[in-house]
């Protein structure tokens, strides 16, 4: 690295034609001869929650053995390349996923709403919803002070809040896992175009026709800041120029894929209910959204995210992997081997997308490591055995380096019915957001 007296702010952006573009961390943003630990190059800790609905085929999820001497299960085997930054967690429970004596069914809505909050929710189909503050929003209240967006909420399926989605419970409970206040659920965004515009600028309109028309008349955001890019690159060293080239290539690729998806949606799926910009297949959609999440972390637009790979009671089918049945119906397998096998395929397919995100983060430089090194990502569900709606021994995996704050490569078996909120308290501690209690927490988990 060439040492110069030039120092760029970590919040440096490029501006042009009303567009602003945040930049990744560059060597030029680190004061010359400064210790990494005292500069912007020190690991910025990030939190991500990835939620999968409708429970698991638990025999295919649970690893054999515990501690460092464990064997990844068939569902988790695609995470093998990340084993050294992986904690498989067993024994955690969400007691508020269970019904009280007068509540009856509604396990799916309760599973999602209580997963990150750890509180009993009010059973209602109306606007008088009552939940709690979710752990991601507790983190966002602190970590969001340093970023443009306090948090980012993403989904794959359409997640409206109106109506009832599960046995007397408002859709607001089933269709998000993030709650800013006990009465304010955070809406999840499933349209890549809207996410991109939120991150990098554009019209506030979410009208599909307007967005598609704008594709043909607007120039790329990068084109609008081209002069600024050229000027900036002339003053940077070789490594920083290479980083910028890779970063801009990634943005161009995301733009291209969003535009192609919109063109295909308009041509092949002209139904009004189908949002423009959503790719035709689940895998393409999930990976595009994970690319956007990576860009959001890379540019430090946000340090907190939640992501729903599906909403509770999801009826999505997965014919591309040999499961033409609705996910929810398959989850109620009645211990039928054929149905169990189909559920296992869906569970593994979701984990495959999570592995894509981990690989993307691991290959993206950040400070003295990678985005994965400085992130803490929880993958899991609010239901374990899907056939009978169990809320104990939740299927959970904690991935990432967490900036060196826990050791991976282990299967940790906690005492039965340990509140999952104990895990969240510990996670917040490791993110530099200490709290005494979340929901029904009774202490701290040992990682």
Image: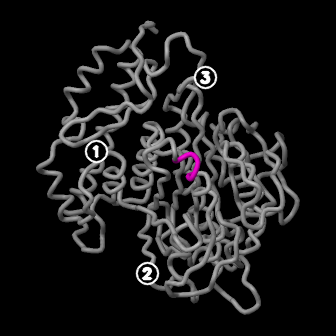
Of the residues under marks 2 and 3, which one precedes in the sequence? Answer: 3
> To which quarter of the image does residue 210 belong?
bottom left
Q: CA distance from mark 1 to mark 3?
A: 35 Å
296 shown above or below 135? above
Question: Which picture quadrant has residue 264?
Answer: bottom left
Residue displayed at 55% across by 50% down: 354
Residue at numbered disc 1: 255
- Pointer 3 residue: 38
In the rendered structure, are the residues bearing label 1 and label 3 in contact, judged by CB atoms less than 8 Å apart?
Answer: no
* Relative horizontal placement of residue 239, taking residue 35 as reference (left or right): left
Between the residue at mark 2 and the residue at mark 3, the CA separation in whole angstroms equals 48 Å
- State the residue lying farthest toward the left: 217
Instruction: Note whether 239 is above or below 400 in the view shown.
Output: above
Q: Main secondary structure of the magenta part?
A: helix
Task: Place residue 36 in its image quadrant.
Answer: top right
Find numbered disc 3 in the image and state the secondary structure of the residue it sits on. Answer: helix
Which residue is denoted by mark 2 in the rendering? Answer: 162
Q: Secondary structure at mark 1?
A: helix
Which residue range is magenta in the image? Answer: 140-144
Q: Residue at x 64, y 68 (%)?
A: 55
Nearest to viewer (mark 1 / mark 3): 3
Q: Position of residue 51 (x, y in %)?
A: 58, 60
Position of residue 115 measured from the top left corner of the image (x, y, whole percent) = 66, 66
The x, y position of residue 366, in whole percent, is 52, 29
């Amino acid at each position: 690295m060439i040492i110069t007296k030039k120092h760029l702010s970590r919040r440096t952006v490029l501006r042009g034609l009303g567009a602003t573009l945040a930049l990744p961390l560059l060597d030029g943003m680190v004061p010359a001869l400064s210790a990494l630990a005292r500069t912007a190059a020190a690991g910025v800790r990030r939190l991500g929650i990835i939620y999968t609905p409708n429970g698991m085929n638990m025999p295919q999820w649970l690893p054999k053995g515990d501690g460092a001497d464990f064997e990844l299960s068939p569902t988790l085997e695609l995470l093998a390349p990340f084993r050294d930054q992986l904690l498989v967690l067993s024994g955690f429970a969400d007691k508020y996923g269970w019904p009280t004596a007068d509540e009856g069914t509604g396990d799916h809505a309760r599973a999602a709403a209580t997963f990150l909050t750890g509180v009993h929710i009010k059973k209602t189909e109306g606007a008088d919803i009552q939940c709690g503050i979710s752990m991601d929003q507790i983190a966002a209240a602190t970590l969001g002070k340093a970023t443009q967006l306090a948090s980012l909420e993403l989904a794959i399926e359409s997640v409206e809040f109106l109506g009832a989605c599960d046995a007397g419970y408002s859709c607001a409970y089933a269709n998000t896992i993030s709650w800013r206040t006990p009465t304010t659920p955070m809406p999840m965004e499933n349209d890549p175009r809207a996410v991109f515009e939120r991150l990098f600028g554009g019209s506030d309109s979410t009208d599909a026709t307007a967005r598609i028309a704008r594709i043909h008349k607007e120039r790329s955001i990068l084109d609008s800041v081209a002069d600024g890019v050229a000027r900036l690159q002339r003053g940077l060293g070789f490594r920083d120029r290479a980083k910028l080239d890779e970063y801009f290539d990634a943005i161009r690729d995301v733009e291209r894929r969003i535009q192609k998806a919109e063109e295909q949606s308009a041509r092949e799926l002209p139904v009004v209910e189908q949002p423009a910009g959503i790719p035709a297949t689940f895998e393409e959609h999930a990976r595009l959204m994970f690319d956007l999440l990576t860009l959001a972390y890379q540019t430090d637009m946000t340090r907190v995210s939640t992501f729903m790979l599906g909403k509770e009671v999801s009826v999505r089918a997965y014919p591309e992997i040999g499961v033409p049945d609705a996910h929810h119906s398959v989850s109620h397998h009645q211990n039928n081997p054929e149905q169990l096998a189909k559920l296992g395929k869906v569970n593994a397919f979701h984990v495959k997308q999570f592995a894509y995100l981990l690989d993307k983060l691991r290959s993206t430089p950040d400070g003295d490591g990678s985005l994965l090194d400085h992130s803490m990502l929880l993958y899991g569900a609010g239901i374990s055995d899907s056939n009978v709606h169990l809320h104990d021994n939740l299927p959970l995996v904690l991935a990432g380096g967490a900036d060196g704050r826990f050791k991976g490569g282990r299967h940790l078996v906690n005492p039965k019915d340990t509140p999952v909120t104990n895990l969240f308290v510990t996670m917040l501690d490791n993110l530099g957001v200490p709290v005494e209690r979340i929901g029904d927490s009774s202490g701290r988990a040992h990682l």
